Image (tube, grey):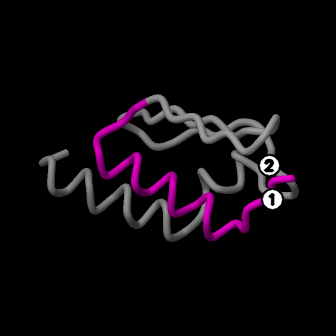
């Protein structure tokens, strides 16, 4: 049986995908998952893994700071 991830593990996967330039991101863990859509104006999250909300992760300060850094590097 696969144990559920921590918020840190899911956030790390999200930030890795953002760093690779992904716009539509899905992180699955067993039968549960969170999805993210990257827009020019930010990030929108959906779904749940354990007690980890895609909506909350999309608003996470570290994720938003990283997204801002990526946007500055891209000249946005």
| Quarter holding residue 6 | bottom right
Q: Are marks 2 and 1 in contact (CB under 8 Å)?
A: yes
Residue at the limit of the structure toward the front, as seen here = 1
User: How would you rate the neighbour count of disc 1 (Cα within 10 Å): few for under 14, some for 14-19, many for 20 or more?
Assistant: some
| Quarter holding residue 15 | bottom left
As drawn, the label of residue 68 is none
Q: Residue at x 86, y 54 (%)?
A: 50
Q: CA distance from mark 2 to mark 1?
A: 7 Å
Q: Give the residues in magenta.
A: 1-23
Q: Which residue is mark 1?
A: 4
Q: Which residue is mark 2?
A: 49
Viewer-side residue, 27 vs 30: 30
Camera-nearest label, 2 or 1: 1
Q: Is residue 18 above or below residue 39?
A: below
Q: Is residue 69 magenta?
A: no
Looking at the image, tell me whether mark 2 or mark 1 is earlier in sequence order. Answer: 1
Q: Is residue 22 magenta?
A: yes
Viewer-side residue, 31 vs 11: 31
């Amino acid at each position: 049986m696969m144990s559920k991830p921590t918020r840190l593990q899911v956030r790390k996967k999200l930030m890795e995908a953002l760093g690779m330039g992904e716009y539509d991101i899905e992180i699955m863990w067993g039968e549960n998952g969170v999805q993210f859509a990257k827009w020019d104006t930010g990030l929108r999250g959906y779904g749940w893994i354990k007690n980890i909300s895609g909506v909350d992760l999309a608003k996470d300060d570290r994720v938003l700071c990283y997204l801002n850094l990526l946007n500055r590097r891209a000249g946005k």
